[in-house]
Amino acid sequence: MSESIQRETRQDLRELQSERLRETVERAYENVPFYRNLLEEAGIAPGDVGGIDDVEKLPFTTKEDFRDEYPDGLFAVDDDILRIHASSGTTGKPKIVAYTESDLELWDEVMARSMAAAGIEPGDTVQNAYGYGLFTGGLGFHGGAEALGATVIPSGSGNTQRQVELARDLESDAIGCTPSYALYLAETAEEMGVDPRDLPLSTVLYGAEPCTEPMREAIEERLDATGIENYGLSELIGPGVAVECAEAQDGMHVWEDHFYPEIVDPHTGEVLPEGKEGELVLTSLTKEALPVLRYRTGDLTTLTYEKCDCGRTMARMDSVTGRADDLLIVRGVNLYPSQIEDVVLEFDDVAPYYRIDLYREDNLDRLELTVELAADFDGDSDTLREEMGERLANTLSFRPDALELVDYGTIERTEVGKVKRVYDHR
Ligand SMILES: [Zn+2]
């Protein structure tokens, strides 16, 4: 089922989604007082949901709902929970998520499916450099790799010299980590006198941070491996919601038989047509412990339903341009850090490290951008700075107030957790 469902006709897929949506709404209504109230307030009874097209009638679930219902107000089961995870909130309480036995099986299945789509095969050795613990990354990857029949090295996050040694000595075929960590691993290898391109890794399955195309190219070049992006979030299950296929590397296939995607206008909540950028909204279709109706992910992206070159018919989502939370408003201009990254990393003379500092002076916003030069840079940095400033001004209709080019290795690296590139001092 797992293999063939990925190439199902859209019509058959929608029938399956319709049946599963009805069950999910029923389950949420019957077992979660929060959803019963929400649906009643919206004037919807479970019987009103005939098929997947009716999803648009349903109310949204938000991050705030997770916080308000902390810790377990969104759970649909009492006794059958086998595992709890939590997503780290930057502020306030974490979002607590729960899994029944069937949810854990589902997670293994979608994660194994993701790895297979990424080109990882049974018998391959997968090094898991995601953090183990409350964060869903570590155990999510771990379960998927085992379900696929791969050998897992549960190296966890950090301890990068040891990661390099393990990858080399145990001949890891693939590594799961954040995109910034993949680069840090390459750099650490170099410092140890190991050419990162000689490491046996052929796939870097990255996620948990936004990653632009130039950043992917940097990862592929530095590690001589294929970079594959995957997407997920704890509120839905963890990693395993969507992944690129190794064949096309052109958008992440959303595992639509379990997670129904929509794109909405972030301001009005109106559903947008195919190809339009907006906020990704996801509905779980098979979850038991924590059914989620129309979750506002805060992630901005687009969806396409065009059949992929790989033959899969499932919708593809674009790389996330930014989270609504990452949006910077600089002198009234909306800006995502990824837009700056996209421009800056197009230059061959820079290393994939930068930081953005925001200040307020005399009631005016001030944006300072610091970019690292490539290790082998021997050109004229004034010319480079001028060109980069020009390109930023053209693409973003704005020019940083200060643009500093610093020597390779100057900007602090992130060894554990998600990389921080924006420092808002305002
Ligand atoms: Zn594909």
Image (spheres, rainbow, N blue to C red):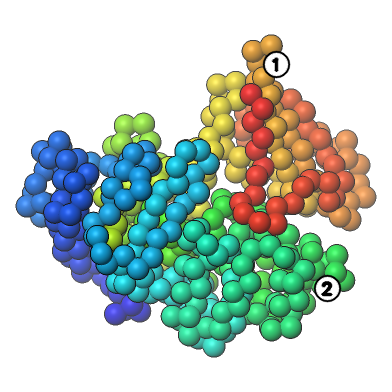
The mark found on residue 361 in the picture is: 1
Residue at the disc numbered 2: 194
> Is residue 246 shown above or below 53?
below
Residue under the point 27% across and 54% down: 75
Residue 416: % across, % down: 66, 56
Q: Quadrant of residue 269?
A: top left
- How many marks the image carries: the answer is 2
What's the distance in space between the residues labelled 1 and 2, CA to CA?
A: 46 Å
Residue visible at 55% across and 65% down in the picture: 132
Crowding at mark 2 (Cα within 10 Å: few <14, some 14-19, many 20+): some
Q: Inspect this view and state whether residue 399 appears.
A: no
Residue 176 lies, in percent from the top left, at 58, 68
Residue 144 visible to the viewer: yes
Quadrant containing the C terminus is: top right
Residue type at numbered disc 1: Glu
Amino acid carrying mark 2 in the image: Val
Secondary structure of the residue carrying numbered label 1: strand
- Whether residue 260 sits left or right of residue 247 in the image: it is left
Residue 166's x, y, as percent? 71, 78
Residue at 85% from the left image edge and 65% from the top image edge: 191
Q: Is residue 64 above or below residue 345?
A: above
